[in-house]
């Protein structure tokens, strides 16, 4: 809900200040930035089509903004990083557990798993 947004953003900022892993810190900064941008009407990222294809029953406008920010960052990292996909997905699930709603972790795990399966099946991200 909207009243939780300032609290979650504060949590994100607090963790960003104390994180010691540079990759973890970089992900948190990206999530915070994309989360803030998600309130701009019409904001979208190149990863949105992959997320929409992986969760067709969930229009992007209906996905919790924190979850969407986590999905966007993780999808971006899956697309263009040397980090093993399992690590990317595990980190995204951990962020969802900390900042998302009750079902966020399983939702994010499922969407990212589908994105990865689609890539493996088609040889590219679709």
Image (spheres, rainbow, N blue to C red):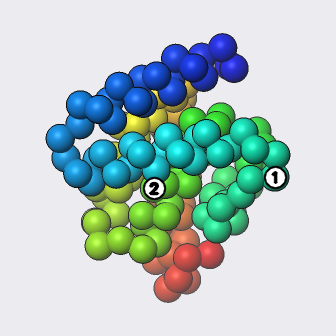
Say which residue label 1 marks.
42
Image label count:
2
Which residue sits at x=46%, y=72%? 79
Which residue sits at x=50%, y=23%? 8
In this picture, residue 72 sits left or right of residue 16: right
Q: Is residue 29 above or below residue 50?
A: above
- Neighbourhood count class around disc 1 (C-alpha, 10 Å): few under 14, some 14–19, many 20 upward: few
Instruction: Name, please, the residue furthest toward the top.
Output: 3
Quadrant of the rendered image containing residue 84: bottom left
Say which residue label 2 marks.
74
Looking at the image, which is closer to me, 13 or 115?
13
- Neighbourhood count class around disc 2 (C-alpha, 10 Å): few under 14, some 14–19, many 20 upward: many
Which residue sits at x=69%, y=65%? 49
Q: Is residue 28 above or below residue 115?
A: above
Where is residue 13 shown, x and y percent of the image? Answer: 41, 30
In front: mark 1 or mark 2? 1
Q: Is residue 32 above or below residue 84?
A: above
Instruction: Name, please, the residue furthest toward the bottom.
Output: 123
Q: CA distance from mark 1 to mark 2?
A: 21 Å
Where is residue 86 shown, x and y percent of the image? Answer: 31, 58
Which residue sits at x=67%, y=53%? 55
Residue 84 shows in this picture: yes
Where is residue 40 shown, x and y percent of the image? Answer: 75, 44
Q: Quadrant of the N terminus?
A: top right
């Amino acid at each position: 809900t909207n009243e939780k947004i300032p609290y979650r953003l504060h949590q994100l900022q607090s963790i960003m200040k104390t994180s010691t892993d540079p990759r973890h810190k970089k992900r948190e900064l990206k999530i915070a930035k994309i989360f803030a941008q998600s309130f701009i009407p019409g904001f979208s990222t190149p990863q949105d089509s992959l997320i929409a294809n992986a969760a067709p029953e969930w229009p992007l406008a209906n996905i919790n903004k924190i979850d969407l920010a986590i999905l966007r960052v993780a999808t971006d990292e899956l697309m263009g990083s040397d980090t093993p996909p399992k690590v990317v997905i595990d980190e995204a699930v951990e962020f969802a557990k900390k900042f998302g709603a009750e079902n966020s972790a399983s939702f994010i795990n499922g969407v990212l798993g589908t994105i990865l399966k689609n890539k493996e099946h088609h040889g590219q991200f679709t």
